[in-house]
Each structure stands twice: as structure tokens, then as C-alpha cells.
Amino acid sequence: MALKKISFRDSVERMFTHAASLMELSPGLEQKIRVCNSTYTVRFGVRLRGQIHTFTGYRSVHSEHMEPVKGGIRYSLDVNQDEVEALAALMTYKCALVEVPFGGSKGGLRIDPRAWNEDELERITRRFTYELSRRNLISPSQNVPAPDMGTGEREMAWMADAYKRLHPDDINAKACVTGKPRTAGGIDGRVEATGRGVQFALREFFRHDDVMKRAGLSGTLAGKRVVVQGLGNVGYHAAQFLSAEDRALITCVIERDGVIRNPLGINIDALRGHIRATGGVKGFVGGDFSEDGLRALEDECDILVPAAIESVIDEDNAARINCKLIIEAANGPVTADADAILREKGIVIIPDMYANAGGVTVSYFEWVKNLSQISLGRLERRYEEARARMLVEELERLSADTGLNWTLSRGFKEAFLTGADELELVRSGLDDTMRESFKKMKEVWMNNPKVDDMRTAAYVVAIRRISNVYNSLGL
């Protein structure tokens, strides 16, 4: 009789328990941080195609130690209560780790978005928003959803508009969701945020020789062989930035219908265009196609980037994983059992709660932008340009007066005299967040003899910060 595989929720529980066991927490406080506060199940009907169709949705609130609570909404037939509660817990720990002032929440609608046309999806989404709103599960001050698997800017725009119609007197209504289109109150850089965060996380990893040594790596990202599983929004942006800006080699891309391999590096933009045109990677001329699917996770490489769904690396295939570093761009791609096997093999894992925190970080920036009713950089950009121009003109005057007759290059002057726009400020804020959070994890990892991996270090940092909040509240 085959042993039952560990569930995603059980994996999160076990990882939390291991980290908490290394800390001096009272049993009551540990339990308070661990448990999911509430989960709501909503069932509603929508008349479509001449008949009423009933849909089931979930919204889980894990922790309200800070409010509002934050977390995405996914559309998938695989959505269930256990998954949503596990994801909500991860959101709590993720927000605490990167010091974003939210509690954790998560939601989902059990639906195949590909089975419905755009008009039908809009009607379903607006009704789902109504069901959430009447239970205070969507609100700028209490619960702020965002995109997740199967949803995107379009769905967030529908939700924001539906909420505004239900609450016309709420001046902060746009802040009820994040991940909206720029034209509907969104922020530059949100679509790329999670993938960009993966890139920034890897860049920070490669700044620390002692950390790289643990993974058997050295040098820079340039030339490193990277396998990416999933070329959705997160996987695409991570792969594109790593290849185009850091000169890493994306040697393998794993998608639903198969695998594309090219040891010289895959053109990510060309592959994504092919997927959009054909629905899969088969037939792409920039690499070799095979149908071995998830077996390609076992390809030899330097860096493995699982960027799709949870539990793709488990006790069955962990021993065959042949990389030096795994960065979890998806939520929970490595089970607790697999995590132990990989650590025994000497493979370093950059954990999901840190690696994919770019999305919630930039969502925080968008939420602040919506509440302040002003875009980032609007007040100070021209002032910064004017001060920079004063400095350049004074340097050039001094050069002429002293007879040095040197001039600043045109390219430097143009770059120096241009104030930062919203996208540049968002990227700067995200980069700073990923750098500082990594340093906190590394401090625990390197200085606590009980902590032997980065995931445990991340949990320790997050749990400590949450416990400090509860203690300050007198709990």
C-alpha cells in the first residue's frame, strides 16, 4: 500500500513547527501565530448560457495582527479550503519577513477561467466581489485581494469597479484591490513585480561569497545554467530579466505540453510569443522539444526556478534533482519531505516566502499610492532635476573659470538630470526590500547554530516579528 503524500498545508505546518521549536515562544503564542483565524466559503449563482451556474469561492484570513490583511485570489478548479488556508499562512509570514504592514489572507474561486468568455468571466467576478463585500472580505482597510493564478489586471479592475459601485462614498475605494491596470489606479511595475523580485533575490544571493559557497557557486549570474518551470507571468519575467540583464542561460523551459531545451540559451521573448500563438511550446524552433514534462526538473543546471504550482518537487523526485540552487518563484513548490532530502544533498533553497515577495511588496506600494491619491515621484521629480542641473552647471562653470575645459559626457548628463519616474522608484523600493530581507535571513542562518537552512531562517525572522507585534498588543 502506497504511503499518502504530504499535502501542501501539511508542508507549511511542518516547516512552521520546525522553526518555532527553535524559538522561545509560549505555547499559547505559538498556537495564536499558527492557526488560521477564519475561512469563509461562499456559493453563488450566475445565469449564464440560459441557465443558473453555481460557483464556490473561498476567502481565508490567517492573521490580523496587522490590518488590512493581504493576499491574492486565484481562479482554478483545484482551489480548496486547505490550499487557501496554507497560502494565507504563507502570506502572513511573507509580509512579516519583508516588513510589509499586512496580515495574511488568500482567496480562490473554483472555476476554469478558460471555459468562459470574457463577458461571462466579468459577470462571475462582479458577483464574487459582491459576495466578498457583504462579508467585509474586500475593503481598503480590512482585506485587500490581488491577482494570483488564473487572474490578472483585468479581473482586479472588475473587482475594484464592482466594489466602488457598492461603496460610492468610499474615497479610498481604489485601494480595495491591488494589481489593477495603470489606467484604473494601478502602479507601474506591478505586473513584473514577482519576477523582478526573483531576479533581485538572486542578485543579492550572488553578492555574498559565504552564501554562494554553501551552494557550491561562485562568480556572477552571467553564464549560469537556469531551468524554469512555468512561463506564466512570474516565470516569464524572471527568465527574461535573468537572461537579458544578467546574461544567465535559460537552458530549459518546462510548460504544460512539454519541454524546450537549448544548452546555448533560449530566447524567452520568442518562446513566449510562440506559446501565445500556439498555446504551447511544441513546435518552437529555438530549442529541442520533448514531452517528458516534469522530468526536466531533474536536468543538470546551476539554478532551478519552479515558477508554477505547489508540490512539484516531492519525496519521489527530490533525490534526482541535479542543481546547486533552487529559488522558489511559486508558492510551495518543494514539499517538507523533499526539502529534507534536498538539504542532505547540499542543495540550497531560497524559500518562497522571500523569493516571490516582490508581488506583495509592490502591491503595498500600489495600496499606499491609492490611499495618498498621488503617483510616486510626482511631487519631487522636477525638484530633483533642478538641483541636479544646478550642480552640473556649477561644475562646468568652475571648469571654464579654471581653464580645465573638461565637459561631462552627454549620456551622463541626460541620465543625471532626469528625475526618477514611478517605475524606477518602484524597482528601487523593491530592490531595497529584497536586499534588507535577505540580510536578516542570512544573519539568522549564519549565526544561529540551530538553523541550518535559509527557509528555517526566514520562518524564524517572520515568527519573531509577528510575536513582537502580539507582545506589544499585550497578548
Image (cartoon, rainbow, N blue to C red):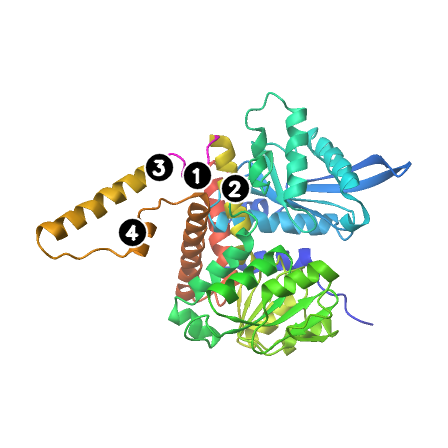
Q: Are marks 1 and 2 in contact (CB under 8 Å)?
A: yes
User: Comparing marks 3 and 4, which lies closer to the viewer?
Assistant: 4
Compute the Cα span from label 3 to label 4: 19 Å
Disc 3 marks which residue?
Answer: 380
Reading the image, the residue beneath label 4 is 413
Residue at the disc numbered 2: 187
Disc 1 to disc 2, C-alpha distance: 9 Å
Does label 3 or label 4 sit earlier along the sequence?
A: 3
**Label 1 amino acid?**
Leu
Using the numbered discs, state the Cα–Cα distance from disc 3 to disc 1 in whole angstroms. Answer: 9 Å
Residue sitting nearer the eye, 42 or 62:
42
- Residue 350 visible to an observer of this rendering: yes
Q: Are marks 1 and 4 in contact (CB under 8 Å)?
A: no
**N-terminal label among 1 and 2:** 2
Check disc 2 and report its element: helix, strand or loop: loop
Crowding at dot 4, Cα within 10 Å, few <14 / some 14-19 / many 20+, comes out as: some
Q: Is residue 469 left or right of residue 186?
A: left
| Residue at far left of view | 402
Question: Mark 2 belongs to which amino acid?
Answer: Ile
Q: Is residue 357 visible?
A: no
Location of residue 288 in the rendering, given as x and y in whole percent from the top left corner: 68, 77
Q: Residue furthest top?
A: 169
Between discs 3 and 2, the one toward the N terminus: 2
Which-is-in-front pick, marks 2 and 4? 4
Of marks 1 and 4, the one in the foreground? 4
Which of the marked residues, 2 or 4, is nearer the chain's N terminus? 2
What residue is pinned by disc 1? 376
